[in-house]
Image (cartoon, rainbow, N blue to C red):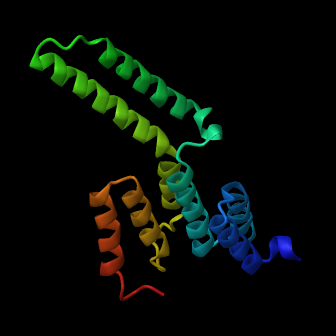
Amino acid sequence: AYPNDTDMLKLGAKYYMSTGRYDQARDCAYQLVQTARNEESYVIYTDVIAQTVAERGLSADLAEDGEVKSLLAQSEALQKQANEIQVITESDEERRDELQNLAQDLQEQAAQVEINRAINYLIAKKPLLGDDTGLLDLQIAKLYLAVDDRDTAREYIHQVVCSSGSIR
C-alpha cells in the first residue's frame, strides 16, 4: 500500500531531501507524479529537481546529456581561446575577460538545463484555460528566479496576483 500512498510519497521526498539523498527524493517525487497527477505533485517534483541542482550542481548523469555536453564544450573552447590571448594591451585584457565571461555564462546555462526543463514541464502541464490554483504559476516563478530570470518570474507572480479572485 505504501508505494502508491501519496502522503507517504510526499513525506519520503521531504525526508530524502532533508537528508541529502537527492536521487531517492527524486524517485519518490516521480512516483508521486505517476500516482497523483495534480498541481501539487508537479510542484513537489519540480521543487526536488530545483533543490537538487542548487545543492549538487551539475550531476554526472546530466554531464552525459547532449545539450549539456555541447554547452560545456563551447565553454571549454572559449576558455581555451581566453587562455591563449597574450595580454599586451588593455584591449587584449578586455577581450580575454569577455571570453572568460562568455565561458562562465555557458557553464551556468549547462548547470541550469534541468531547471529549464522543469519550467517547460510545468508550462506543458498547465491547463489550456490557465492555472486556477495558482500553484503552477508560483512554482514557475520560483524556478525562473532559480535561473535568475527575474522579469519572467515577476510576470508569473503578477498573473497569480491578478487572478487571485478566481483561484480555488
Report if residue 99 is visible in the image: yes
In the figure, is residue 73 to the left or right of 10? left
Residue 89 location (% of width, % of height): 11, 14
Quarter residue 152 falls in? bottom left
Q: What residue is rendered at 52% in x and 47% in y?
A: 57
Q: What residue is rendered at 30% in x and 65% in y?
A: 155
Q: Nearer the viewer, residue 124 or 11?
A: 11
Residue 12 location (% of width, % of height): 73, 71
Residue 159 location (% of width, % of height): 33, 73
Q: Residue extending furthest right? A: 1
Instruction: Give the vertical position of 51 relative to 70 (above or below).
Output: below
Q: Quadrant of the N terminus?
A: bottom right
How many circles with numbers are drawn on the protein? 0
Instruction: Give the vertical position of 83 relative to 48 (above or below).
Output: above
In the figure, is residue 147 to the left or right of 27? left
Q: Residue extending furthest left? A: 90
Report if residue 121 is visible in the image: no
Residue 101 location (% of width, % of height): 29, 32
Q: Nearer the viewer, residue 40 or 127?
A: 40
Q: Nearer the viewer, residue 130 or 49?
A: 49
In the figure, is residue 145 to the left or right of 94? right
Quarter residue 153 falls in? bottom left
Q: What residue is rendered at 39% in x and 34% in y?
A: 106
Instruction: Give the vertical position of 107 relative to 40 (above or below).
Output: above
